[in-house]
Each structure stands twice: as structure tokens, then as C-alpha cells.
Image: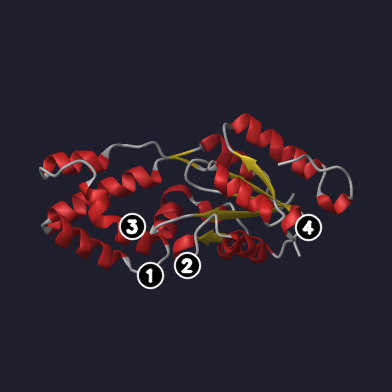
Amino acid sequence: MAETCVILDIGGVLEMTPDTGWERRWEERLALPPGTVHERMRDVWRAGSIGSIGEREVHEQLAVRLGLDASRTEALVADLWAEYLGTPNAELIAYVRGLWGTCGIGILSNSFVGAREREAALYRFDELVEHAGHIVYSHELGIEKPDPRAFEAACAALGARPESCLFIDDVAVNVEAARAVGMRAHLFEDNARTIARVEAHLAAPARAGGAVPPG
């Protein structure tokens, strides 16, 4: 059983993912009112986030619901993934890579079908963890944060007790949900504070019986 663990979110933590405006650009290109893409695709986005449909069906539904031919469908999907994947948080990724051997490392991400393969190819997140199963994606688990079962699954994947795990996310409701299941949790705002919080967690782990920094 892993005694001390750090579990990180991806989007907004390991990846920087600002809004690129791709949906509005496509609405303008297709002469659609603002918000049309999200409204027509809402259930598809949801299904893709919990893995109840595959990538091929996502492409098919985009084509049907937005009236796209094959080339435009591929172009829209490329824009979607460009925003989703963002850019790597190189400093934090390098820091996490340096934690190897000092603690268990896991990843818990609300994701979309196809994310594991793309993120492994671009950012080698699979090399940040000891085993592929230590990366828990919502589209593979079928459950999204802040559902308590998502956090429980991430701890179970590492063989760790919740109180020995520090969870890092950029969404406050997810941080509070992690705390509710007994995990330590930190709201990501910048690399310096996050690295300091990890260092504090590793210096005063729950197993030592000493004081553990809040949140």
C-alpha cells in the first residue's frame, strides 16, 4: 500500500487550457446563433466525458447535428482538441517527475473519450506515474468529479488511504469533494504555492502522526 500520495488534475493544472473561442468561430463560419454548438452537442459532450460513446460516434453526431461534411468535421475536431489539450505546465510536470521514488503519484481527470492516447503522445503523462492504472480518467471510469466515487477510485488505484493523499485541482468544488472523502486537497492557483503545498504534505505525512497542513 502506498503510504503517501500526490494526485493531480490535468486541465488547468498539468495542462494550461484557456478558452480559445473555437465554438464561436465555428458558429460564425456556419452562420449559427451563439451557443448553438454547445446546445446541440450538450448530451454528446456529456456522453463522451463518461465514455458512453466512442470517438467515431462523436464525429458522426457532429456531422449530423451541425451539417458538416467529412473535412469540416475533422477540422472542427482538431480545434476542439487544440483547446482541450492546451499547453503543458512544464514547470509543474518537471517537478512531479522529480517526485519519483518519494511518494505515490496519480492523476484524476474529468476527461473526454480519446484523451489518454492524445495526452500520452503529447505530454507523456503515462511516464509521470508508475502504472497506467494510476491515471484515472472519467471517460474510462464512467464517473466524473465531484462524485465521491471518483476520488475513491483514484485512491484505490494507488492502494492508498484517502488521508494519505494530497489532491490538487483548479476547481474549488472538486477540492471540497476530495476533502469530504478524507483526502488532503489543495486548490491550484500557481506553481509556487502548489509545490510548497506538496512539499509540506511530504514532510508531514499522516502516517507520521504529526500535524498535517490543512487543505
Task: Determine which residue is flagged by label 3.
Answer: 45
Tag 2 or tag 1, which sits nearer the N-term? 1
Q: Residue furthest right?
A: 209
Judged left or right of residue 13, residue 181 is: right
How many angstroms separate mark 3 from mark 2 (CA)? 13 Å
Q: Front-most of 15 and 182?
A: 182
Q: Residue at x 16, y 42 (%)?
A: 33
Task: Determine which residue is flagged by label 2.
Answer: 142
How many angstroms separate mark 4 from mark 3 (CA)? 36 Å
> On residue 178, which mark appears?
none
The C terminus is located in which quarter? top right
Q: For residue 16, which quarter of the picture?
A: top left
Tag 2 or tag 4, which sits nearer the N-term? 4
Marks 1 & 3, CB-CB < 8 Å contact: no
Task: Determine which residue is flagged by label 4.
Answer: 3
How many angstroms separate mark 1 from mark 4 (CA)? 34 Å
Marks 4 & 3, CB-CB < 8 Å contact: no
Amino acid type, callout 2:
Gly
Judged left or right of residue 180, residue 36 is: left
Find residue 95 and report its horizontal and vertical position in percent.
62, 39
Marks 1 & 2, CB-CB < 8 Å contact: yes
Marks 3 & 2, CB-CB < 8 Å contact: no
Task: Determine which residue is flagged by label 1.
Answer: 52
Q: Residue at x 47, y 45 (%)?
A: 11
The N terminus is located in which quarter? bottom right
Tag 2 or tag 3, which sits nearer the N-term? 3
